[in-house]
Structure formats: C-alpha cells, structure tokens
Image (tube, rainbow, N blue to C red):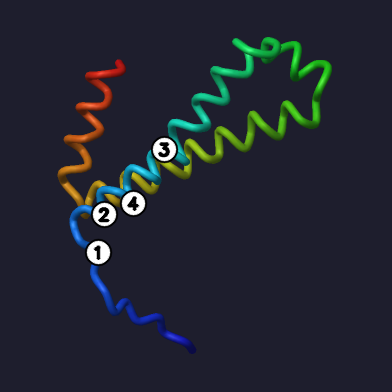
Amino acid sequence: MIKWKNTKQLTKPQRYIRSMNLLLINIVLPIAVLIGIPMLLLPWPVALLFLPGIAHFILIFCLLLIATGVVKIVRIGRDIPWLIGVLSLYSLYFG
C-alpha cells in the first residue's frame, strides 16, 4: 500500500486560512443559497413544485454541504481550540 507522508506542518496563519475557507465554502455559502433563492427568485415551495429536479438538487446539496462543514469544523475544532473562539465571535457578531 501507498502511505502518504505529511512532510510539512501547517503554520498558524495557514491553519486559520484553511479553517476560514472551510467555513466559507461549507457553511456560509450553502446558507446564503438557501436564504437567497427565496429572496431573489421564488419561494422554496414554488421551486420544489415547479422545478422539482433542480430545486431538490440545490436543497439536498446545500444541506449536505452544511452537514459536511459541521463535521469538519468539529473535527478541526478538537485540534485547534482557537477556532471555537473565532466561531463564537462570529455568532456574537452576526447572531
């Protein structure tokens, strides 16, 4: 079998950038799509009724991205305690 060798360690700024990128792609973007489609185009019940294939795909894909992002953030959060502080500041600022 092939074993991947992790030859370089990530620095603190690189870990911060990677975790923020993960947060943006897996959490913020799907939530923006789930909220933005009803505001800009049409409500979800209408989309699910008249555009069943596309609307179901977008809805399920966004929910899968959010679930994947939550799992990844929990796993990273165990290794990076400061990420929890960033997320709590984010929730205080936007929540």
Mark 4 secondary-structure assignment: helix
Residue 49 or residue 20, whichever sits in front: 20
Residue pointed to by mark 2: 15
Is residue 67 rendered to the left or right of residue 82?
right
Q: CA distance from mark 2 to mark 4?
A: 5 Å
- Which residue, given by chain and number where applicable, does mark 4 sit on? 18
How far from the left and from the top, in percent, is residue 15? 26, 54
Earlier sequence position, callout 4 versus callout 3: 4
The amino acid type, in three-letter code, at marker 2 is Arg
**Where is residue 26 shown, x and y percent of the image?**
46, 40
User: Mark 3 vs mark 2: which is more N-terminal?
Assistant: 2
Left or right: 62, with 50 as reference point: left
Residue 56 falls left or right of residue 1: right
Mark closer to the chain start, 4 or 1: 1
Spatial distance from mark 4 to mark 3, Cα to Cα?
10 Å
Mark 4–mark 1 CB contact (< 8 Å) = yes
Identify which residue is drawn at 21% across, 28% down: 88
Residues under numbered marks 1 and 2 in contact, where contact means CB atoms less than 8 Å apart: yes
Q: Upstream in the sequence, badge 1 or badge 2?
A: 1
Residue 5 coordinates in the image, percent (x, y): 34, 81
Q: Which residue type does callout 4 highlight? A: Arg
| Location of the C terminus (image quadrant) | top left
Q: Residue at x 38, y 39 (%)?
A: 23
Q: Amino acid at mark 1?
A: Leu
Marks 2 and 4: CB-CB under 8 Å? yes
Most foreground residue, 21 or 47: 21
Dot label at residue 24: 3
Q: Residues within 10 Å of mark 4 (few under 14, many from 20)?
A: few
Residue 10: mark in rendering: 1
Dot 2: what SS? helix
